Amino acid sequence: MYHKTKGYKVFSVFNHILLIVVALSCFLPLLHLLAQSFSSKSAVNGGLVSFWPVEFNTDAYAKTFRNTNFTGSMWISVVRTTLGTLISMVVITTAGYALSKEFRGRNALMWIFVFTMLFSGGLIPSYILVSELGLKDTILALILPGAFGAYNLILIMNFFKTIPKALEEAAFIDGASFFVIFSKIYLPLSLPGLATIGLFIMVGHWNSWFDGLLYMSTTDKYPLASFLQTVVVQNSAQNVALSASEAAALSEQSIKAAQIFISTVPIIAVYPFLQKYFVKGIVLGAVKE
């Protein structure tokens, strides 16, 4: 057997080592942030914190959740991610179901969608369009421009193609409509593909920060990623919102670490529920028979 050969064993060892290194490179920075968020100001400012809290306290989290700028932006991200994922899934699944069938002009229509993967109108035309439609400073400006993704469409379309046509033909014989077949047969049998695409869309909405800076004129309308960009990259002390007494007891770095860590929790919490579908959805959706 090939898995008993010396070459395979050597490859397996190096493969495991590489994966462990990659995993640690992703996990350790997050662990360092967590340790900083639970450490005292003197320990953080003195560079004494590595991967374990020093002088443990929860003051940074208490201050973070009292910060209305942070909680407001987090709520906007929750609403945006929920609505954005729902709208995108409806658009992509219905389009993918239609394009999984053979009809006149299908290839031309498919190439139009693929063209959008390679070229876009550009930043300035997109901004003008959103402004002229009256979407600026509304949550729809964060949802509608990215509601359709050709890459996700191709994945779900190929996934639909793996479903046996005999099921659809049998349903037609029993008098089922296209909508009934789509909702009762295709969607339930496509849970791995739907979960995979849904995860892509959720992560994209949650992590998107540039459109918030672009389409929102005030910081109180920023989604969480845009808010964190102003705190971490632009180093805006106003969004940290420390009073004189709080500044004496708390480190800005601890508060930033707490805010960043909290922002990762919702997506991390979703992954375990979708992981069993993820690999299967990618493999089946990426292969065309």
Image: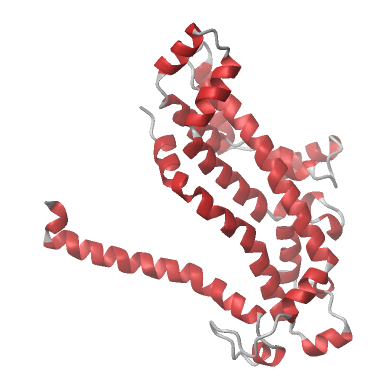
Render colour scheme: secondary structure
Q: Please indicate whether residue 131 sits to the left or right of residue 8 in the image.
A: right
State the residue at coordinates (85%, 65%). Answer: 68
Most distant residue in the front direction: 174
Q: Residue 80: percent from the left, percent from the top? A: 73, 47
Image quarter hosting the C terminus:
top left
Q: Please indicate whether residue 282 sits to the left or right of residue 62 in the image.
A: left
Quarter-wise, where is residue 32 in the image?
bottom right
Q: Is residue 17 above or below residue 171?
A: below
State the residue at coordinates (49%, 32%). Answer: 190
Q: Please indicate whether residue 158 sits to the left or right of residue 51 in the image.
A: left
Q: Residue 53: percent from the left, percent from the top? A: 60, 85
Whether residue 198 is visible to the viewer of this picture, yes or no, is yes
Q: Is residue 24 above or below residue 197?
A: below
Whether residue 109 is visible to the viewer of this picture, yes or no, is no
Number of residue marks: 0
Q: Residue 207: percent from the left, percent from the top? A: 65, 55
Q: Please indicate whether residue 158 sits to the left or right of residue 257 in the image.
A: left
Q: Is residue 152 above or below residue 206?
A: above
The one of 15 and 178 positioned closer to us in this rendering = 178
Q: Residue 174: percent from the left, percent from the top? A: 50, 8
State the residue at coordinates (86%, 54%). Answer: 217
